[in-house]
Amino acid sequence: MLSFSLFLYVGSVAAESGIDAWLRYAPLHSANSIPSLPSRIVSLNTSVNDPVHIAGVELQKGISGILGQNLSITSHEADSDSSIVVGTLIEYSNAYGHSAKTPSLEADGFWLNTTGPTVQILGQNERGALYGAFEYLSMLAQGNFSKVAYASNPSAPVRWVNQWDNLDGSIERGYGGPSIFFENGLVVDNLDRASEYARLLASIRINAVVVNNVNANASLLSPANLEGLGRLADAMRPYGVQVGISLNFASPAANLTYGNLTTFDPLDKGVISWWSNVTDAIYRRVPDMAGYLVKADSEGQPGPLTYNRTLAQGANLFANALKPHGGILMFRAFVYNDQINESDWKADRANAAVDFFKGLDGEFADNVIVQIKYGPIDFQVREPTSPLFAHLQNTSTAIELEVTQEYLGQQCHLVYLPPLWKTVLDFDLRVDHKPSLVRDIITGKRFNRPLGGSAAVVNVGTNQTWLGSHLSMSNLYAYGRLAWNPADDPEAMLQDWIRLTFGPDPTVMKTITSLSMASWPTYENYSGNLGIQTLTDILYTHFGPNPQSQDNNGWGQWTRADHKTIGMDRTVSNGTGYSGQYPAEVAAMYENISTTPDNLVLWFHHVNYTHKLHSGKTVIQHFYDAHYEGADVAQTFVTQWEGLQGKIDEERYNETLFRLTFQAGHSIVWRDAIANFYHNLSGIADAGGRVGNHPWRIQAESMTLDGYVPYAVSPFEAASNATGIVTSSNSTTGTASTTLNFPNGTYDLAVNYFDMMGGNSSWTVSINNHTVGSWLGDNVDSGRLGHAASVYLDAHSATRITFRNVTIAKGDVLIIVGTPDGIEPAPLDYIAILPKGVVD
Ligand SMILES: *[C@@H]1O[C@H](CO)[C@@H](O)[C@H](O)[C@H]1NC(C)=O
Ligand SMILES: *[C@@H]1O[C@H](CO)[C@@H](O)[C@H](O)[C@H]1NC(C)=O
Ligand SMILES: *[C@@H]1O[C@H](CO)[C@@H](O)[C@H](O)[C@H]1NC(C)=O
Ligand SMILES: *[C@@H]1O[C@H](CO)[C@@H](O)[C@H](O)[C@H]1NC(C)=O
Ligand SMILES: *[C@@H]1O[C@H](CO)[C@@H](O)[C@H](O)[C@H]1NC(C)=O
Ligand SMILES: *[C@@H]1O[C@H](CO)[C@@H](O)[C@H](O)[C@H]1NC(C)=O
Ligand SMILES: *[C@@H]1O[C@H](CO)[C@@H](O)[C@H](O)[C@H]1NC(C)=O
Ligand SMILES: *[C@@H]1O[C@H](CO)[C@@H](O)[C@H](O)[C@H]1NC(C)=O
Ligand SMILES: *[C@@H]1O[C@H](CO)[C@@H](O)[C@H](O)[C@H]1NC(C)=O
Ligand SMILES: *[C@@H]1O[C@H](CO)[C@@H](O)[C@H](O)[C@H]1NC(C)=O
Ligand SMILES: *[C@@H]1O[C@H](CO)[C@@H](O)[C@H](O)[C@H]1NC(C)=O
Ligand SMILES: *[C@@H]1O[C@H](CO)[C@@H](O)[C@H](O)[C@H]1NC(C)=O
């Protein structure tokens, strides 16, 4: 139906910072004449802070950018005019004296009709009109001039994002710089970025932002911050984006001037009155506040269980305070005991949400939505669908997704997430043996609930790219699209985003589609396979690999790996009973290993490493093969991207190349860490002979060292041969030299080093006294990569730099000189001399 082929495009060469995201309105260059649009915009509301007015301004700006046509804006239509009319249905009928002939629209829905001389963009409400304007602009920006007339309605009323911003300006799990909302305990003075964010969100039909961290600080409720929230809400309101806030359950007893009760018992009259007063005060300043988000009795946060009250009683405390104002309470289902005992074979954190919430179905007030993470643990690279979606039939629910890539490479690895999200949204829970897709549960259709929807943790920051990475923005774009229509197709959404973000050059389209669609399977391949979870370090950064951090602690993300076996026995027959939390048909599938899909086998079953998968491979060989395949594919991301040089602006080209190059190097760190760890544990050799065999490497510790000393890296698998080198003190320059014994030829020279927080060491590598290259270990200290940094030599700091096409002769002397800085002792792991096409 869409026809793009008529138009030719010229890539924009001007540097782009990424701040405009998918709203660039880049000029369309057409081979044929561009159809002429109406000459004016009729905006049926002229109040400057009204989304309808904003829609008119946005249409004017967009059409000017895309088509170079400057349209005037008026507030009413003269007879016989052709125009672009934007407004609400009511405004339309007031202006024209008759109602528009549109199909029925739901709240936030819109009607777009381009078939006649006048383009109609009509919203059921103001926000819907703005959504319609963005839809029309998206078509034009993609060169799509089809004649269309259709209504679009949201799948669900709640389409929110959660920002985990702290009042001091830091962001928990944020990788795109500090907060755009807060600094020094207060709302920032300049809210331009907040408005720009609201504009971006409106363009993907997100209708609310919870602005502060779920691990909430009670001082958000101070008079100064309520005033600040008021300003924030004012800044976002013109875009139809409402503000919500996260609350600390213990606020009434926070011992501050604004919370000086001695209890936070949800049934205490004083507490009830306190919350009701606070809520009234907030609504006095923010009359359209969306509602509250509460993380209670979770990971050390206070909650109703302190007083032996139920989670429903805790939730209803807030719901009742919100009710007179029309607000919604989002109550997180992420409640679990983080002190469970691994020696108990039946203990299982995955059981927690259903255990806590199942008995409460029907006890929540009708303006409560239980916000459920997609899987039962915590945003892992693959999880089965949370079974709680099947249990809350008399309670509204929303799915919680994560755009910020906490366990998924922290925006330093490309991972396009919608294919992962779709494994959950499209999953059929078969409640009562009837079709029960998660997407129909959260939208309220399956159990006939009035409320429901989606929330995603987004965590944009002050970086001009918003998320720290240009390519990661496809996740935010697609999240909005899925919140509106969870049946939308991941590849189709991606391609719209590429056209809008980089233009429709066919090579650009093909390459970014290929990279992005391959990215999640690739990341899963080189991180955690077969449902074992991501295997990031769960006790420290959540960034690089650390498989043993999963076990021997109370967090319950166990793998139960020993020298013979691996996996969690979650069967009813002999394990934790988790599989029995699903409706019968799904439970039966997971209970039986022969009907459990390979990609979740270790989630549900405890097996020998030699267990044969449906694929015919053993578990351990699958681990090895997947890791080698994943790292191999990650190398191609760099070469594929290089094919785009000159086809997109240099700024975004360079910054993305830098990240994909980092990812390619770090994928080898991942591959080796996981493969070596399980090789060491199981003692089972890789049938491919690759694990532990690195013919093209020279271990730094085996070089001739002067001022450098060997260093035993922990965990051992984070370094090649478990050993790196560091300068003998932080004021000594180190030299490592070796005579090369490879056949004469041209090679890529890779150096694996550690880029720690707390110093910017420098290195120079030379061959026969000719400098090959110099570099600074400043990626983490400068914030350039943005991921959680480490102060150790480990798999988070492990980094590779590659010098291409280096001529090497047998007998050449290679020398690396390292100069430490701060606490970073110019650490090195190994050198790899790589013939073309070899990954080692
Ligand atoms: C679309 O808009 C035109 C005016 O440009 C109007 O004549 C036509 O009836 C509209 N189509 C529908 C289906 O409402
Ligand atoms: C909390 O308030 C009580 C009563 O006013 C006071 O005795 C106590 O010292 C306060 N605690 C803190 C940590 O401020
Ligand atoms: C806090 O407690 C003090 C002393 O009991 C009281 O005077 C004051 O009004 C209280 N403040 C609020 C906000 O309730
Ligand atoms: C709530 O406000 C009412 C009316 O202003 C006041 O009487 C009451 O003490 C307040 N409750 C609390 C707990 O501050
Ligand atoms: C909560 O209940 C448990 C047992 O049911 C009891 O031991 C405990 O004292 C109660 N705690 C409170 C604060 O009432
Ligand atoms: C059954 O559970 C026990 C632990 O209670 C475990 O040692 C054993 O391996 C399990 N059996 C099977 C067949 O998984
Ligand atoms: C696992 O291997 C052991 C031998 O090490 C064997 O006795 C056991 O039957 C195997 N378990 C399964 C489920 O194949
Ligand atoms: C992009 O990188 C190239 C090669 O390093 C450099 O010459 C160019 O100046 C960079 N361009 C921008 C806009 O940063
Ligand atoms: C591996 O490290 C050990 C010390 O941990 C060292 O003795 C050995 O020589 C190293 N092997 C190579 C190949 O460098
Ligand atoms: C912002 O992101 C860009 C692109 O990834 C990166 O080059 C830059 O260093 C980042 N800056 C900060 C301050 O985070
Ligand atoms: C390798 O290169 C060196 C230096 O250029 C040269 O002396 C030597 O003959 C070459 N060896 C072979 C086998 O070509
Ligand atoms: C050098 O290292 C020592 C500890 O090893 C540390 O106390 C000192 O601060 C470091 N010096 C600098 C300049 O960071």
Image (cartoon, rainbow, N blue to C red):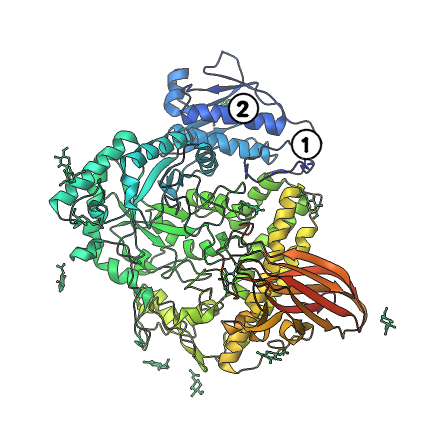
Q: Where is residue 587 in the image (x, y as percent from the top left)?
A: 34, 67
Mark 2 residue element: helix
Residue 183, compared with residue 826, is above or below; it is above
Q: How crowded is mark 2: few (under 14 residues within 10 Å), some or many (20 or more)?
A: some
Q: Position of residue 548 (x, y in %)?
A: 44, 72
Residue 29 marker: 1
- Residues under numbered marks 2 and 1 in contact, where contact means CB atoms less than 8 Å apart: no
Q: Position of residue 386 (x, y in %)?
A: 36, 59
Residue 60 marker: 2
Ligand 1 under 8 Å from disc 2 Cβ: no
Q: Where is residue 824 in the image (x, y as percent from the top left)?
A: 55, 61
Q: Residues within 10 Å of mark 1 (few under 14, many from 20)?
A: some
Q: Which residue is drawn at 39% across and 45% down?
A: 165
Residue 636 marker: none
Q: Is residue 74 left or right of residue 240?
A: right
Residue 630 visible in the current orientation: no
Q: Residue at x 30, y 55 (%)?
A: 333
Residue closest to the far front: 731
Type of the residue with mark 1? His
Figure quarter occupied by ligand 3: top left
Mark 1 residue element: loop
Residue 461, compared with residue 787, is above or below; it is above
The residue nearer to you, when weighing 264 against 823, is 823
Q: In which quarter of the image is residue 300?
A: bottom left
Type of the residue with mark 2? Gln
Kindly report the distance in space between the C-alpha atoms of the residues bearing marks 2 and 1: 18 Å
Q: Earlier in the sequence, mark 2 or mark 1?
A: 1
Residue 801, compared with residue 594, is above or below; it is above
Quadrant location of the C terminus in the rendered image: bottom right
Q: Quadrant of residue 632?
A: bottom right
